[in-house]
Amino acid sequence: MLENALPTADAFKLLIVSSDRFPSFRVDVAELFGRQMTARGHTIHWLLQSEQECAKSYETSWLGGHVWVGSTSVGESRLARLHKHIRGIANDFRLFKLVRENRYDFVQVKDKFIAALFALLACKWYGVPMVFWLSYPFPESDLYNASAGLARYPIFYRLRGNVFKWLLYRLILPSVAHAFVQSEQMKRDIVAMGISADKLTAVPMGISPSLVDLKIGAPPGESAVVYLGTLARSRRLEVIVRAFALVARAIPRSKLYLVGGGDDPSDERYLRDEIERLGLRERVVFTGFLPRDQALEYVARADVCLSPFYPTPIFNSTSPTKLIEYMALGRAVVGNHHPEQRMLIEESQCGRSVEWDERAFADGIIEILENPIAAAEMGRRGRRYVLEHRNYERIAQLVESRYRELHVRSLASSTSTASE
C-alpha cells in the first residue's frame, strides 16, 4: 500500500461531485480517490449529500480531503423524496462558489446529470477542465424499466430517461474534457452513440484491501449458496430461485442465502411468492440490507456464490462488483454469460459461466457443491487473479495516468492562450 504523500509539482487538485451519499463506502469512491489518489499527493475535495437525515448542510474532513455535505430528508413519501432531490440540487449549485474560490485543476461529476450542467457552466466560466464519470447507463435503464413494466412511475421514468439520454449524449459527453466509464462494453456502447473513443477510459471495479484481510471462515455443515446484492425486480432473480429448487432436490443439505434487499417492498414479495410456490420456505434465507462487513461474512462462509446478470444491453455494460468480491474472498462462483463477467471467470478459472437458464445455473451449482476440492482450487485461483489484476493500486495508476495526460494538455492550452 502507498504511504501518505506530500503534494508534488505535478500533483493536481480535484473537486468531485457525486451521486454517492456521505459517507460513501463504495470502494470505487472511498478507496480509489479517498485513499489511493490522495496517497499519491493529489488534493481531493468532495461535494456530497448526506446519507442520514440532516437538516442543515455542513463541512468536514474525510479521507484526507475536505467535504461539503448537503442536507437531506430520508422519508419514503413522494413529498419527502421530492424534498430530498430539491436539497440535492441546491447542494450541487454550490459548485459555482467552490470552483470560483478554489483553484481546482479539474472538476469531476459522477452520475449526476443536473449537476453536470452546473459544472459545465462553472468550468467554462472559470477555465477548469471537467471530467464525467458514468458508472451505469441510467437513461437506458429508466427507459427499459418503463417499457418492461418494472418502473414504479412509468411516465416519469420514460420522461427522465429521454431527457437524461439527450443530455448525456448530446451535451455532457461531447463537452467534457474526458469521461471515465465502467467497462469496455460500456465504452463500445457510448462510441456507438457518436462519442469519440479517445475521450473515454474504461475503469473496472476492483477490490478493497479490507477484503484481502478478511478471514475466510470454514463452511458450515450445510451447503451454503449465497447471492449478494440488490433484490430489485429488474434483476430477474427468480431464475436463481428456480435453479435452487433443482439444487435442493439433488443436495438436501443445501441452503440459499439472499443477502440484500429490494428497491421496493414488492421486489422481495415477488421472490417470496415464488419461493412459497416452489416449497422452499425453509431452505431460503432473506437477510435484508446489512452493513457491508456483515454481508461479506455470508460470502466468506459460502460454498458457492452466484452472480446473475439478466442479459440486457443495460446490465451487459456493467462491471460486476459482487463477482470481484466473491473472488477476493476465495469463493467458487457461478455466473451467467456477461461480457466482463465471462471474461473474468474464464481467465481466472474461478468457477462456471453459464447460460441464463435455471437448469444451467443449477448444473453449475451442483457441480461445485459435489466437488469441494475442485471448488477450493477455483476459489484460490479467483483470489490470486483479483489480487494481481483488480487491486485499487493498479486501477489508481490507470486513472492517475489519464488525469496526468489531461493536466499536461490543460497546462499547455493555458500557456498557449496566455502567449496570445
Image (spheres, grey):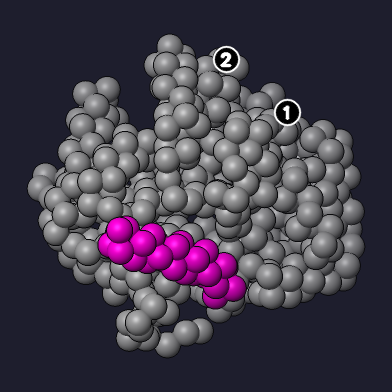
Q: In front here: 409 or 383? A: 409
Look at the image and say whether residue 401 sits in the magenta stretch.
yes
Instruction: Please tell me which residue is depicted at 76% across the width and 58% down the height of the picture.
Output: 344
104 left or right of 233 in image: left
Figure quadrant of the C terminus:
bottom left
Residue 381 found in image quarter = bottom right
As displayed, is residue 266 above or below residue 57?
above
Residue holding disc 2: 147
Disc 1 is placed on an element classified as loop
Instruction: Where is residue 1? Give x, y as percent.
Output: 51, 84
- Number of the label disc, if any, that sits on residue 278: 1
Instruction: Where is residue 105? Give x, y as percent.
Output: 32, 63
Marker count (numbered): 2
Residue 241 seen in this snapshot: no
273 left or right of 4 in image: right
Query: What amino acid type is highlighted by mark number 2?
Result: Ser
Question: Nearer the observer, disc 2 or disc 1?
Answer: 2
Query: What amino acid type is highlighted by mark number 1?
Result: Leu
Instruction: Please tell me which residue is depicted at 47% across the width and 16% down the height of the picture.
Output: 158
The range drawn in magenta is 392-420
